[in-house]
């Protein structure tokens, strides 16, 4: 199978136009995906850059090799403009610099095809497309890297691995399925673990930085967005055995204790953090290499330790150096905040963090004393198995429903003079959108008791209203009733990923429509275009476990009323 490529059809240099013709696996042109980038001089030094697609109707996208038009419009063009005007050397290595790109592309296509169905059955709250294709990309990278390592070191067996903080375990599943013996460990098991089958080994356990968590028989230690475990990865690998290697893809910034605190403003925080994780690898005695993965995530740089800077005979000496180094990091971070620095943009973390997760802090009360004595870092605190959820999702259902109804009535109060002018727009039917109020105004109408209950939840009123996304729209602290007719017209809502706007089929019509039940004019959408049930006869049984109903239907977010 040929590697798919975006092949430049033609460069019309005189007019500054480049036409791109993407090819599919069989080297056939994907006619629907032809696009042009045009550069035009506006005047003197001013240029404009534009994107033209041949036909946006049949545009196929997977968000990786074939990007979405909205992404090209909103992200790519501004990036191109930035890159073509800035004059600084990139802080990062070029993409896939340590492996053969052609082999990578070929294998990526095969694996993407092979694991494509995972997207359909993804039971987690996170965006399946992003996860599946990103994990396929990371697996592909490792498989090629390992293949090259085998031929270089003349290894006959496929390398074994342990993925620390494996989360949903998909990477473990793919690598195992591709013949590498290994397992994943995470402090919190996921629903999806049950779907992989017995050949995918996943263990629920908290990793602590001590001699009990070494992997002497393992060839590679993997840390993929491994959060507070990230700086420990090189340490664990170096102490596991002389031949043990590691691969780490850092994202959120953690040191050995908790939040990584920025030291300089000369570099970006990301670059500085990568340099820190690289320094840990150096100090542990690795020749650390850096590469950039081909993934949609903004954090694409991985650090790899594949060989050592010292001979095996110096192990003891180097280990003393490691201990000293870790100790020196302790004094660096004493007294500093222990809150994690979370990558909120990255959907990968949606199922990984609660907003007030306690991580890697100096409170040692939860770690058994016998563990503390052995620890390489007294005071390291793994995150809790069950993250405390304080985003209003655990408030009693009837309390949520009552408050939602109260706020909605307030907005729909027809005697109000401050009615939204949209209601007078003759082009729309007279479905009442009510008025818009500030959060403060809404709060003034709620009972003290209600406010107190909400205050105990982080985010309070705003979070409750945002969670009830079907009913409310909250923009810049202004609350209004969501007008789904408008949502249909402006379906290019930039901030919501496309997949999040479409309710997956298994949650369609599993809950009653709030508008159908509560709004004086019913639901503005016809039954066939509303993902919620218009009447009990439309209700389908939900496949989601009961406790998760709050987060579904995806994209329409947790709505208000469950009348089942
Ligand atoms: C950001 S998520 C990434 C998950 C997965 N590797 C991925 O890329 O999708 C970080 C994961 O590390 C796990 N984790 C954090 N600290 C841990 C520890 N001390 N022991 C085991 N797992 C831990 C968390 O439970 C979480 O699943
Ligand atoms: Zn409806």
Image (cartoon, rainbow, N blue to C red):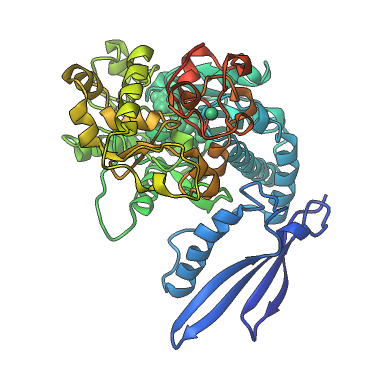
Asked whether, in this view, residue 205 is left or right of residue 61, the answer is left
The vertical placement of 292 against 138, above or below, is below
Q: Position of residue 348 (x, y in %)?
A: 48, 36
Ligand 1: which quarter?
top left
Q: Residue 179 or 472: which is nearer the viewer? A: 472
Q: Position of residue 11 (x, y in %)?
A: 69, 77
- Image vertical order of residue 501 relative to residue 63, above or below: above
| As drawn, 52 above or below 416 | below
Inspect this view and state whether residue 239 appears. no
Image mark count = 0
Residue 510 vertical position relative to residue 248 in the rendered view, above or below = above
Which quadrant of the view contains residue 168?
top right
* x then y, percent, for residue 489: 54, 48
Taking depth in this image into account, of 363 and 386 the one nearest to the observer is: 386
In depth, the one of 435 and 173 nearer the eye is 435
What residue appears at the point 35 percent right and 22 percent down from the top-left corner?
Answer: 405
Viewed as shown, does residue 315 lie left or right of 443? right
Relative to 25, 448 lies left or right: left
Asked where in the image residue 20 lies, by quadrant, the reply is: bottom right
Residue 533 in sight: yes
Q: Residue at (59%, 22%) from the top-left corner?
A: 509
Q: Residue furthest bottom?
A: 44
Q: Residue at x 59, y 34 (%)?
A: 128
């Amino acid at each position: 199978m040929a590697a798919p490529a975006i092949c430049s059809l033609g460069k019309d240099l005189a007019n500054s136009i480049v036409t791109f013709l993407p090819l599919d696996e069989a080297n056939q042109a994907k006619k629907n995906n032809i696009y042009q980038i045009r550069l035009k001089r506006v005047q003197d030094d001013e240029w404009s850059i534009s994107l033209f697609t041949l036909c946006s109707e049949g545009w196929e996208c997977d968000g990786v090799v074939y990007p979405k038009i909205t992404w090209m419009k909103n992200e790519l063009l501004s990036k191109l403009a930035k890159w073509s005007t800035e004059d600084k050397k990139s802080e990062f290595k070029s993409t896939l610099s340590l492996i053969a790109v052609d082999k990578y592309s070929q294998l990526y296509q095969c694996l993407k095809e092979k694991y494509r169905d995972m997207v359909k059955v993804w039971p987690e709250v996170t965006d399946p497309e992003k996860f599946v294709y990103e994990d396929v990309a990371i697996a592909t990278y490792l498989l090629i890297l390992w293949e090259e390592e085998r031929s270089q070191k003349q290894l006959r067996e496929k390398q074994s691995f342990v993925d620390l903080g494996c989360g949903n375990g998909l990477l473990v599943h793919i690598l195992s399925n591709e013949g590498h013996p290994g397992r994943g460990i995470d402090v919190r098991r996921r629903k999806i673990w049950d779907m992989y089958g017995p050949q995918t080994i996943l263990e629920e356990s908290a990793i602590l930085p001590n001699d009990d968590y070494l992997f002497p028989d393992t060839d590679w230690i993997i840390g993929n967005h491994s959060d507070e475990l990230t700086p420990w990865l090189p340490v664990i690998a170096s102490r596991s055995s002389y031949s043990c290697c590691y691969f780490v893809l850092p994202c959120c910034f953690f040191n050995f204790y908790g939040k990584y605190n920025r030291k300089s403003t000369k570099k970006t925080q990301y670059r500085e953090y990568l340099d820190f994780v690289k320094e840990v690898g150096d100090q542990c005695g690795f020749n650390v290499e850096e590469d950039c993965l081909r993934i949609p995530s903004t954090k694409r740089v991985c650090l790899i330790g594949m060989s050592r800077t010292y001979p095996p005979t110096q192990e003891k000496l180097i280990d003393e150096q490691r201990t000293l180094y870790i100790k020196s990091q302790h004094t660096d971070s004493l007294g500093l905040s222990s809150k994690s620095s979370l990558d909120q943009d990255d959907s990968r973390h949606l199922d990984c963090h609660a907003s007030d997760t306690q991580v890697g802090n100096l409170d040692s009360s939860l770690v058994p004393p016998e563990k503390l004595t052995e620890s390489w870092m007294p005071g390291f605190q793994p995150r809790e198995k069950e993250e405390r959820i304080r985003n209003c999702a655990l408030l009693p259902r009837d309390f949520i429903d009552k408050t939602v109804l109260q706020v909605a009535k307030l907005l729909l109060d027809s005697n109000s003079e401050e009615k939204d002018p949209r209601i007078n727009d003759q082009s729309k039917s007279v479905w009442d959108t009510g008025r818009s109020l500030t959060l403060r105004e809404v709060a003034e109408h709620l009972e003290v008791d209600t406010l107190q209950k909400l205050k105990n939840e982080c985010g309070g009123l705003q979070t409750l209203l945002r969670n009830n996304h079907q009913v409310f729209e909250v923009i810049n602290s202004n609350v209004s009733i969501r007008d789904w007719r408008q949502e249909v017209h402006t379906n290019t809502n930039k901030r919501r990923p496309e997949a999040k706007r479409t309710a997956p089929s298994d949650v369609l019509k599993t809950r009653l429509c709030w508008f159908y039940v509560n709004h004086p004019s019913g639901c503005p959408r016809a039954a066939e275009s509303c993902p919620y049930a218009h009447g009990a006869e439309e209700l389908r049984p939900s496949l989601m476990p009961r406790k998760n109903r709050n987060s579904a239907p995806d994209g329409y977010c947790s709505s208000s009323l469950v009348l089942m």
